Image (spheres, coloured by chain):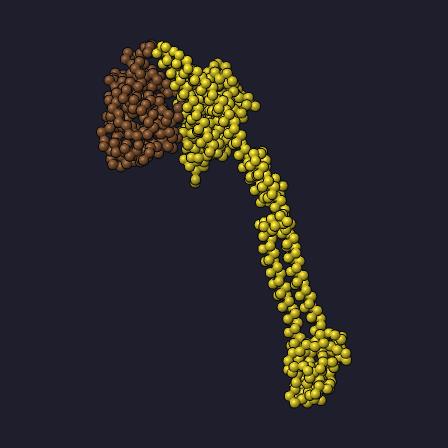
Chain colours: A yellow, B brown
């Protein structure tokens, strides 16, 4: 019975039970109202009819004595055959009327009575219940005026029974429905629990079942699945990064170690000095790799979002182009800019500049055209709700299949590694753009590479 | 060391220093790092005091008499930023270089806001630190309100934004003017590439290519064209320097 007690403990079942309680109470209230308004109305009407007759007949008796009363009784019976009247003398011997069976002397005087219709009572079926008033005239005859209330009693019974039936059915169906719903709910919750346990055991690819009904549980499962996707991506990224880091740091460290060892064997001061200088350069290279990795990690953790502010991307483009144009010219290349003020984005100057510099740096290294000189164009413009900063070159470009891969850490398409770099440049750009809530698009510049930073445009408040 | 063909290049080693002797207080709890730092500064001709924890450092700094303080941010007993705030609160104007393992721009802003004059992230190169410390020590000698700056036969007019050398006008771009201004303000002291990137372009990362060198060599060609005596010199392994006289 483990499942059963569990079912009763679900919130759905509790909710169903609570609904059931309120539902039953309201059914009772409605039926009670109907009962009161029908049955008691009928009862009151009956009693009013009876009392009217009693009053009329009493008046007759006061005016004309027993004989007048008898006449009036007969007249009344002729008028309304439904009325039941018994007239008896002080000892209880019948004097008239259409009612014979009740033993009038044993009944309480001047009060409401209930009796059964017996043999000898005409105008009504034997055994029916009747309701009436027993009158004792002072020093005179006794009289019962009544009405057959069998139909009314039956009606009351029906209403009463339906009241209990309704209650019983409501409880039964409520319990059943609640149980069914909770079991359904529970089955889905169990599925979710089971999936999460399997994920905890290390099966990161497990996903919550979604039945497609779009209800709360489905939405919850969907949200959980999206979260799991994100986590899986991060975990995979982390795994890859750790192994890449180990690999990519091992190479320069090995070199460094070999150089230090060789320097130890050297005799000449100049050689030792040169080896130390090289070692220092290698260390700086390693440190800059670490710094880039740390920056990416920090960006991905989403901290420091508070330090963002609204900036004109045009200013940043202008600054960076100003910084790098002479470098391009030094290599007989061109770095030109095509942008106008009014490119408001939520960013951090340093970050956006770093991203642009990395792109320009890449363009300088790999964007040389057929002539050997780089022609780089940096363009800033508004496109709908976005500010698009494009860095385009005329070099080899990046093959479509590599465009996603090249954003990963330590991936360098330049397999010979003839140009300096740590394989983190584009990864950092990608992290910056993600951090700023934008997109990085790598496309074909025909020829060359076109890197687009698409950032949300910040519109002025008014 | 071989004398380079380029006559503009100083053959002097960077850690030999370019400034007159200063009295420097180092507040740093890492014993190894502190001993290297003190040794280097002494070899560069400076007088160095060392404090290995915050309270002692604050007491020594409060006595006064130092030309420059080098303060680590994370210290036992009293935090580096608390020391700086305390000194500034007491009216001390001594130049302070903040050292920190936290390299983020936001951290840097925090350090400068507390009253630091410069901020250097660990690990740093000693040449970089020395250039900054000597720059800080010399800063107080210059009146920032001077409208005209001089170095050798060069004159910079900050109001009219004009530059003349030996009476001959030199046309500079705004950025080149800013670059030259920073070099001239630090005339007689080594200025590192990072210092230039920070002060002239306001970026706090190391550029991957020789960006600064290109800008400096352009400026140099404008300054030295037609003059026998080079004004702007490269200090190997450290940075650049403009001669004061």
Q: Is residue A422 left or right of residue A165?
A: left
Q: Position of residue A339 (x, y in %)?
A: 44, 27
Q: Quadrant of residue B187?
A: top left
Can see residue A447?
yes
What residue is drawn where x is 39% and y is 26%? B205
What residue is drawn where x is 71% and y is 78%? A83
Q: From the viewer's perspective, is residue A109 above or below residue A395? A: below
Q: Is residue A414 left or right of residue A33?
A: left
Q: Position of residue B78 (x, y in %)?
A: 31, 35
What residue is drawn where x is 73% and y is 83%? A97
Can see residue A443?
no
Q: Quadrant of the N terminus of chain B?
A: top left
* Residue toward you, A139 or A187: A187
What residue is drawn where x is 49% and y is 34%? A385
Q: Quadrant of residue A213?
A: top right
Q: Quadrant of the C terminus of chain B?
A: top left
Q: Position of residue A293 (x, y in %)?
A: 45, 27
Q: Quadrant of residue A65?
A: bottom right
* Residue toward you, A292 or A255: A255
* Residue toward you, B206 or A111: A111
Q: How many marks?
A: 0
């Amino acid at each position: 019975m483990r499942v059963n007690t569990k079912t009763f403990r679900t919130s759905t079942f509790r909710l169903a039970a609570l609904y059931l309680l309120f539902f039953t109470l309201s059914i009772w209230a409605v039926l009670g109202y109907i009962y009161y308004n029908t049955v008691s109305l009928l009862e009151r009407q009956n009693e009013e009819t009876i009392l009217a007759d009693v009053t009329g007949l009493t008046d007759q008796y006061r005016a004309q004595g027993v004989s007048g009363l008898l006449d009036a009784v007969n007249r009344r019976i002729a008028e309304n055959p439904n009325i039941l009247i018994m007239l008896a003398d002080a000892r209880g011997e019948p004097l008239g009327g259409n009612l014979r069976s009740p033993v009038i002397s044993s009944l309480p005087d001047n009060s409401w009575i209930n009796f059964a219709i017996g043999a000898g009572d005409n105008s009504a079926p034997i055994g029916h219940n009747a309701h009436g008033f027993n009158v004792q005239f002072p020093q005179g005859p006794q009289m019962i005026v009544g009405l057959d209330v069998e139909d009314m009693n039956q009606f009351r019974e029906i209403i009463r029974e339906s009241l209990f039936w309704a209650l019983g059915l409501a409880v039964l169906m409520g319990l059943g429905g609640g149980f069914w719903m909770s079991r359904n709910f529970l089955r889905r919750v169990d599925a979710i629990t089971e999936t999460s346990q399997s994920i905890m055991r290390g099966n990161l690819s497990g996903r919550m079942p979604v039945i497609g009904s779009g209800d709360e549980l489905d939405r919850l499962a969907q949200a959980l699945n999206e979260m799991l996707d994100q986590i899986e991506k991060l975990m995979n990224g982390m795994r890859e990064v750790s192994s890449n880091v180990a690999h990519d740091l091992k190479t320069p460290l090995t070199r460094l170690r070999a150089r230090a060892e060789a320097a130890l064997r050297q005799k000449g001061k100049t050689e030792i000095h040169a080896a130390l200088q090289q070692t220092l350069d290698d260390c700086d290279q390693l440190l800059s790799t670490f710094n880039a990795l740390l920056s990416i990690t920090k960006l991905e953790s989403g901290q420091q979002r508070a330090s963002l502010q609204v900036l004109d991307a045009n200013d940043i483009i202008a600054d960076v182009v100003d910084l790098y144009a002479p470098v391009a010219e030094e290599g007989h290349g061109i770095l030109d800019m095509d942008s106008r003020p009014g490119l408001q984005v939520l960013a951090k100057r340093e970050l956006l500049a770093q991203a642009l510099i990395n792109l320009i740096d890449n363009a300088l290294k790999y964007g040389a055209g057929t002539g050997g000189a780089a022609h780089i164009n940096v363009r800033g413009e508004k496109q709908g709700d976005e500010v698009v900063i494009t860095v385009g070159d005329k070099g080899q470009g990046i093959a479509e299949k590599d465009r996603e891969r090249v954003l990963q850490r330590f991936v360098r398409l330049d397999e010979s590694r003839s140009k300096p770099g740590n394989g983190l440049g584009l990864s950092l750009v990608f992290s910056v753009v993600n951090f700023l809530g934008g997109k990085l698009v790598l496309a074909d510049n025909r020829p060359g590479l076109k890197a687009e930073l698409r950032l949300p445009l910040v519109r002025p408040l008014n | 060391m071989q004398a380079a063909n380029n006559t503009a290049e100083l053959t002097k080693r960077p850690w030999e220093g370019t400034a007159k002797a200063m009295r420097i207080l180092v507040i740093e709890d890492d014993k190894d790092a502190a001993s290297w730092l003190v040794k280097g500064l002494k070899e560069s001709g400076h007088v160095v005091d060392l404090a290995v924890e915050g309270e002692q450092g604050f007491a020594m700094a409060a006595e006064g008499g130092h030309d420059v303080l080098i303060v680590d941010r994370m210290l036992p007993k009293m935090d580096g930023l608390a020391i700086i705030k305390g000194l500034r609160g007491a009216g001390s104007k001594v130049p302070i270089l903040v050292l920190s393992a936290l390299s983020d721009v936001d951290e840097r802003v925090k350090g400068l806001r507390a009253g630091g004059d410069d901020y250097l992230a660990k690990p740093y190169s000693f040449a970089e630190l020395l250039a900054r410390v000597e720059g800080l020590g010399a800063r107080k000698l210059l009146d920032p309100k001077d409208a005209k700056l001089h170095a050798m036969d060069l004159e910079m007019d900050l109001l009219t934004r004009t530059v003349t050398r030996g009476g001959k006008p030199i046309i500079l771009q705004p950025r080149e003017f800013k670059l030259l201004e920073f070099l001239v303000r630090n005339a007689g002291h080594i200025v590192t590439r990072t210092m230039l990137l920070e002060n002239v372009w306001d970026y706090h990362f190391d550029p991957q290519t020789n960006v600064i060198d290109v800008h400096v060599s352009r400026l140099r060609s404008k300054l030295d064209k037609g003059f026998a005596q080079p004004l702007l010199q490269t200090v190997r392994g450290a940075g650049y320097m403009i001669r004061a006289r």
